[in-house]
Image (cartoon, grey):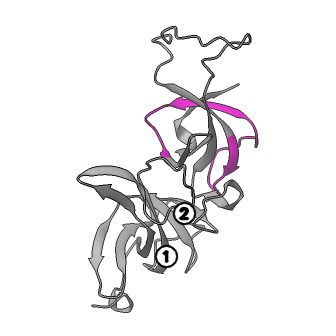
Amino acid sequence: MEMKQVDPKNNNVLVEIMRLKEVVEDVFVGNQNSVETDAQPTEFYVGKAHKFGPTANIKGQCPELKENDLVIFSNWSGIAATTTDAYSKVIPGANIVAITKSLEMKLEDLKPTGARVLVEVIEDSKVDENGVFNDKAEDPREVDTMKGKVISLGAEAMKLEIGETVYFNSFVGNLIVNRPTQKIKTINSTDILFTA
């Protein structure tokens, strides 16, 4: 079967996978065709949205979605559609966490979808103001809390200011850029605990 024969129904989207995660001897080692040589492992796919069901781009799904958009979604999302002309998956529109303009995953090209917020993770330095490495154990009350700077907002996200610092649990959201110098997550705005 060819991709053009796949007809997604309801809220589903047919996506041609453009960037795959790479596994060598059962160990995840990064992304194939990665533009960044310092890229670290992530758990997402980037693909081109070819066709979608009638409710895939409505409120609560992915209202920003247009045909041929490059979309970002969890590699666990949807099911593989066995086609002879491309590796493709059929995924629910609500599982698309961001849309990007290019495979390079530049910050200015990323746009979160729905009620999601794009944040640049702020990692507190373990080097103090005197340049001394501080190896003290973290406060156990803070271990699961992360903070990030708001980069952009999805159409349905709560009202936040660009550049505002938000706090959230570390297990929420999707890490879509994981480089040694930059970590970008999409998180649901309802998962934001507080701002400061």
Residue reaching furthest to the left: 25
Residue 61 seen in render? no
Give coordinates of residue 60: x percent, y percent. 50, 59
Tell me: residue 64, above or below residue 155: below
Q: Badge 2: few (under 14), some or many (20 or more) residues near its Cα, within 10 Å?
A: some
Q: Badge 1: few (under 14), some or many (20 or more) residues near its Cα, within 10 Å?
A: many
Quadrant location of the N terminus in the rendered image: bottom left
Q: Residue at x 45, y 59 (%)?
A: 73
Q: Is residue 24 left or right of residue 122?
A: left
Q: Main secondary structure of the magenta part?
A: loop
Give coordinates of residue 120: x percent, y percent. 64, 41
Q: Which mark is residue 49?
A: 1
Q: Residue at x 36, y 59 (%)?
A: 22
State the SS at label 1: strand
Q: Which residue is mark 2?
A: 59
- Give whichever of discs 2 and 1 has the lower sequence position: 1
Q: Residue at x 73, y 10 (%)?
A: 130
Magenta segment, which residues? 150-174
Residues at circles 2 and 1 in contact by the CB criterion of under 8 Å: no
- 173 part of magenta stretch: yes
> Which amino acid type is marked by label 1?
Ala
Q: Is residue 99 left or right of residue 73?
A: right
